[in-house]
Amino acid sequence: MLCIQFLQLFALEEPEQEGAVSGGKLPVKLEICSGFGEWVIEQAKAEAGVANWSALELRYDRCHSIFSRMVFEAVRCALCKPE
């Protein structure tokens, strides 16, 4: 069984934008079956400093696509691939 520790995965940071959660604890939003990552990457960019995003995908080719988008667009998002 896989158990993801989101508090360890995302370092606690101070919010950067108006409307962000105070106290440095940002909510974690999870996109399940993220496809090729278009939507989740756009959401992660739009909510940078307001929420932490994580993508969960089952297929390796889609994981590669999401990871590539994250790297080339410099977006902070966690990518999970269950066994």
Image (cartoon, rainbow, N blue to C red):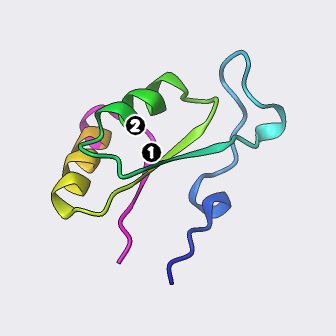
Q: In this view, does 21 lie to the left or right of 51?
A: right
| Residue ranking furthest to the top | 18
Of pointers 1 and 2, the one earlier in the residue sequence: 2
Q: Which mark is residue 60?
A: none
Q: Hey, which quadrant is residue 23 in on the image?
A: top right
Could you say which is closer to the camera, residue 25 or residue 61? 61
Q: Hey, which quadrant is residue 15 in on the image?
A: top right
- Residue 27's x, y, as percent? 68, 42
Real-space CA distance between mark 1 and mark 2, rounded to the nearest whole angstrom:
9 Å
Above or below residue 18? Residue 39 is below
Magenta part of the protein: which range?
A: 71-83
For image coordinates 27% across by 46% down, the residue present is 35
Q: Quadrant of the C terminus?
A: bottom left
Residue 79 highlighted magenta (yes or no): yes
Disc 1 and disc 2 in contact, CB within 8 angstroms: yes
Residue, disc 2: 40
Q: How many labels does the image show?
A: 2
For image coordinates 30% across by 31% down, the residue present is 73
Q: Is residue 76 left or right of residue 36?
A: right
Q: Residue 77 carries which label?
A: 1
Above or below residue 5? Residue 19 is above
- At mark 1, the secondary structure is strand
